[in-house]
Amino acid sequence: MLFFNIVAITTLVPAVRASALRPIRPQQADLSQFSHLESPVALQGVLKNIGANGSDVAGASAGAVVASPSTSHPDYFYTWTRDAALTFSMIVDRFLAGDNSLESLIHQYIAAQAKLQTVSNPSGGLSDGTGLGEPKFYTNLTAFLGSWGRPQRDGPALRASTLIAYGKHLMAAGQQSVVKSNIWPIVQNDLTYVAEYWNQTGFDLWEEIEGSSFFTTAAQHRALVEGSAFAGALGQSCDGCDSQAPQILCFLQNFWNGTAVVSNLAANDGRSGLDANSLLSSIHTFDPAARCDDTTFQPCSARALSNHKLVIDSFRSLYGVNSGKAAGSAIAIGRYAEDTYQGGNPWYLTTLAAAEQLYDALYQWKRQGSLSITQTSLPFFQGLVLSAATGNYSSSSTTYSSITKAVQAYADGFVSVVQQYTPNNGTLSEQFSRENGTPISARDLTWSYASFLTAVARRGRSMPSSWGSSRANKVPTQCQGSSATGTYVTPTVRSW
Ligand SMILES: *[C@@H]1O[C@H](CO)[C@@H](O)[C@H](O)[C@H]1NC(C)=O
Ligand SMILES: *[C@@H]1O[C@H](CO)[C@@H](O)[C@H](O)[C@H]1NC(C)=O
Ligand SMILES: *[C@@H]1O[C@H](CO)[C@@H](O)[C@H](O)[C@H]1NC(C)=O
Ligand SMILES: *[C@@H]1O[C@H](CO)[C@@H](O)[C@H](O)[C@H]1NC(C)=O
Ligand SMILES: *[C@@H]1O[C@H](CO)[C@@H](O)[C@H](O)[C@H]1NC(C)=O
Ligand SMILES: *[C@@H]1O[C@H](CO)[C@@H](O)[C@H](O)[C@H]1NC(C)=O
């Protein structure tokens, strides 16, 4: 069994074996060397956690993404809809960038999701859609019956976006009928769910707070916008997408308080609201074709940059590992300052999200040929370049050059923090100690590895495709609570 596991992984990732033989010593490498050495380890780290052949997750079903092989303190041996969708978003992007070896795994993921949509669970079932909000399942694709923070309404939205990214590729390759039979029914269920339930409370991505989560609302808006276009391209329709997306965008504006994103509303949680939730939202609703739109909180928007500074600064004096770091330099980032879970330490994936947002912003400025500094974003820019002043700077100006250089160095700084606290064998757990940087909590966290790979991809200017945000950034003048009903169908995945 073990023999086959190793064969499968090395077949998928030919580069792994060679690099695994070399000592990695990540702390001593420069950033590009570190990325080069760590990337195959991270990809292998992801693949080892996906059934049925992932060598660290024996017993997991085909296509099931296990959050971490850790079975105690904490037990993450489950498959979460969110983590799986974000992981496969990265895998689909790599496939689209040319790694054809990943396609059969994508098919297995899709088949696993079709099965999971039909599994009745404590959140409900498929007939009225409620079961789609269930956050996690056993890795053999059966319902987890224990108590949990449920429902979590980001999962269906994220899954729809991941399946749409792959579906668009098949459509472009002329495989419309395969998309219609194997992908559209799953996507349709998820879109129907979002359109029906977006205006109800649920648990946030950290599974702690019941209320309205910025991450969830942002992911929902994106899914309905691209879902509508995807339906149209297939000769289908998604009336709920069209009627609800503007209202979700309207609601999304409520999270902005003038200088920052208040990540959880109606939560009564006693927190400031500054939370890496918002950084993750910006990178997962990043549209490379967008301008710096405030309404969708694009990575280069004044809002997202002002928020970035406030979120980062909330961790400056919190952790021992950040002491002695000057204002304006990159530091280790956790989830939110009040966090106590597993010690409330910095996380790899949130520190990497801080970098990724800035790589995305750099791409957007370059593409539009300018950057602007407004009163809202001024504190962010002045934190990096003291002399920064409001204005519009064309990419041919010296100000543009000096500012983008500083932003690039700042972004790289967050990856360097991760590099500093990555053990020599390149493994990434969930957290690293706030005092001394040693790995803490679940080992080999799939999402940590995926976040490394997406941050490094964006650093290397490898971008996801547009989700059409520029057609969906106008906020209605009056927000309305609402819901649309639609149909739920039993999905089946036949041959590809
Ligand atoms: C697992 O590996 C075996 C042997 O290489 C292969 O026959 C099988 O199809 C693989 N299963 C999955 C789900 O990839
Ligand atoms: C699925 O896994 C769970 C947890 O390990 C176990 O309790 C259950 O019996 C399994 N179900 C099936 C059908 O194998
Ligand atoms: C927005 O919220 C953050 C976090 O609580 C706070 O630091 C900031 O002062 C608030 N901004 C305004 C304008 O109220
Ligand atoms: C920058 O350009 C925008 C859009 O053209 C304009 O509204 C704004 O006033 C300009 N800002 C400055 C400081 O020139
Ligand atoms: C990698 O290094 C970490 C930290 O030293 C250690 O806990 C872990 O067991 C190692 N993993 C492997 C697969 O060697
Ligand atoms: C529902 O939408 C309305 C209008 O945007 C908003 O005021 C309300 O807070 C929303 N409730 C939830 C739970 O989303």
Image (cartoon, rainbow, N blue to C red):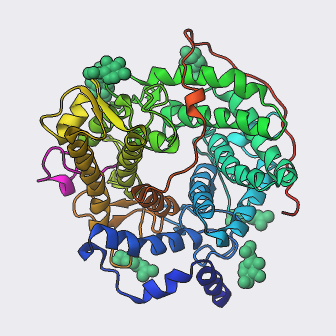
Q: Is residue 292 magenta?
A: no
* Quadrant housing the C terminus: bottom right
Residue at 18 percent across and 55 percent down: it is 320
Which residues are the magenta region?
Answer: 314-334
Relative to 282, residue 108 above or below = below
Left of 383 or right of it: where is 213? right
State the image quarter where residue 452 is shown: bottom left
- Where residue 302 appears, x then y in whole percent? 34, 29
Relative to 20, residue 357 above or below = above
* Quadrant housing the N terminus: bottom right
Looking at the image, in which quadrant does ligand 3 appear? Answer: top left
Front one among 59 and 182: 182
State the image quarter where residue 59 is shown: bottom right
Q: Is residue 226 visible?
A: yes
- Where residue 111 appears, x then y in whole percent? 78, 59
Residue at 16 percent across and 40 percent down: it is 385
- Where residue 449 appears, x then y in whole percent? 47, 64
Q: Is residue 322 magenta?
A: yes
- Where residue 294 appears, x then y in whole percent? 43, 27
Q: Kindly report the secondary structure that dominates the magenta region of the rendered protein.
A: loop
Left of 210 or right of it: where is 452? left
Across the whole image, how many numbered discs are drawn on residues? 0
Residue at the extreme front? 396
Left of 213 or right of it: where is 371? left
Q: Is residue 257 visible?
A: no
Left of 34 or right of it: where is 145? right
Residue at the extreme top? 478
Residue at 68 percent across and 32 percent down: it is 194
Relative to 426, residue 111 above or below = above
